Image: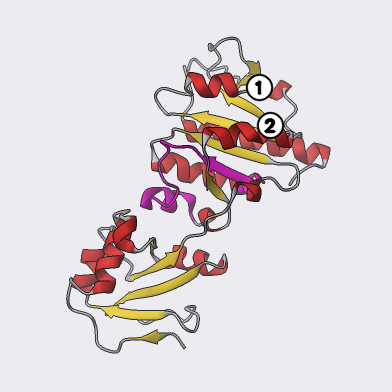
Amino acid sequence: MPHFEKAAVSSRSNSRVKQLRAAFADQARLSGGMVAIEGDHLLTEALRSGMVLKTAFISERRAVPSILPRGVEVLTLTDEVFASAVETPSPQGVAALLVPPVPKIDAVLHGTPLILIAAGLQDPGNLGTLVRSAEAFGATGVLTTPGTVSAWNQKALRASVGSIFRMPVVVATAAEVAALKSHGVRLLAAVGSDNLDPTDVQKIDLSRPTALLIGNEGAGLTPEWMEMADERITIPCPGPVESLNAAIAGSLLLYEASRQRSRHGSQP
């Protein structure tokens, strides 16, 4: 059985409560490098995916979840203290601190690599959605470059709906992205249809080892990334729109890659 305190913690200055609050605020130093999750769904997904929980926090109004493994420290908090530590306005009464995985770039290079590279994305909802789409469409991993929001940001984590626990997400430098070419991976820059005569993605063979570069929501890809790319690609849009949302564009490109790979039998 999990180890838990019988008396509900009623102090907001409790060391574990402060650590939980710091984790929700993305304060890595104060949280000890822990990541916070909240709600039954994320807790279930984390455990199902083999995440290592350090501490679980339960509000006094509910029972300790039976899915918690042995050895996990469990603290019962008064409803007031619990609400003060978490982010959502209507908390479900369960939260946890977990040890985030830190995969290396080799983790995305197995099989026939299909890699999504988030180059300067600022919106955590977009990044979380892309991580979810990457898992859905069989990508081998996601790379985030300097200047991109953390995939463990609370909004990104919730938008991933648990995919962040299973999809390798690696923080990579520009040099590491460029080095993908030495593994036979082509770098394809996603741009608008009016940007330097790009190629329709449907005319590109995505069944080969491929990395898809998705740029900043407003500014797009920087000149550095454009120069590094082997080719510029675009999604044909018959409607009168200038561009697509970053998460939608990345998801459509991943779907096209999945469709081609299913046809060629090269799905990772």
Q: Residues within 10 Å of mark 2 (few under 14, many from 20)?
A: some
- The foreground one among 225 and 151 is 225
Q: Residue 219's image quarter? A: top left
Q: Which residues are magenta?
A: 135-161
**Residue beneath disc 1:** 230
- The earlier-in-sequence mark between 1 and 2 is 2
Asked if residue 164 is positioned above or below residue 178 in the image, the reply reads: below
Question: What residue sits 50% from the left and 65% below the top?
Answer: 46
Q: Residue furthest right?
A: 264
Cα separation between marks 1 and 2: 9 Å
199 horizontally vs 28: left or right? right
SS of the residue under disc 2? helix
Residue 18 drawn at (x, y percent): 24, 67
- The foreground one among 46 and 92 is 46
Task: State whether residue 193 appears in this view.
Answer: yes
Q: Are marks 1 and 2 in contact (CB under 8 Å)?
A: yes
Residue 141, label in figure: none
Residue 173 drawn at (x, y percent): 51, 37
Q: Residue 113's image quarter? A: top right
Residue 44 drawn at (x, y percent): 49, 68
Q: In the image, what residue type sits under mark 2? A: Lys
Q: In the image, what residue type sits under mark 1? A: Asp
Q: Residues within 10 Å of mark 1 (few under 14, many from 20)?
A: some
Residue 94 drawn at (x, y percent): 35, 71
Q: Nearer the viewer, mark 1 or mark 2?
A: 2
**Residue beneath disc 2:** 181
Q: Residue 123's image quarter? A: top left
Q: Is residue 237 magenta?
A: no
SS of the residue under disc 1? loop
Task: State whether residue 185 appears in this view.
Answer: no
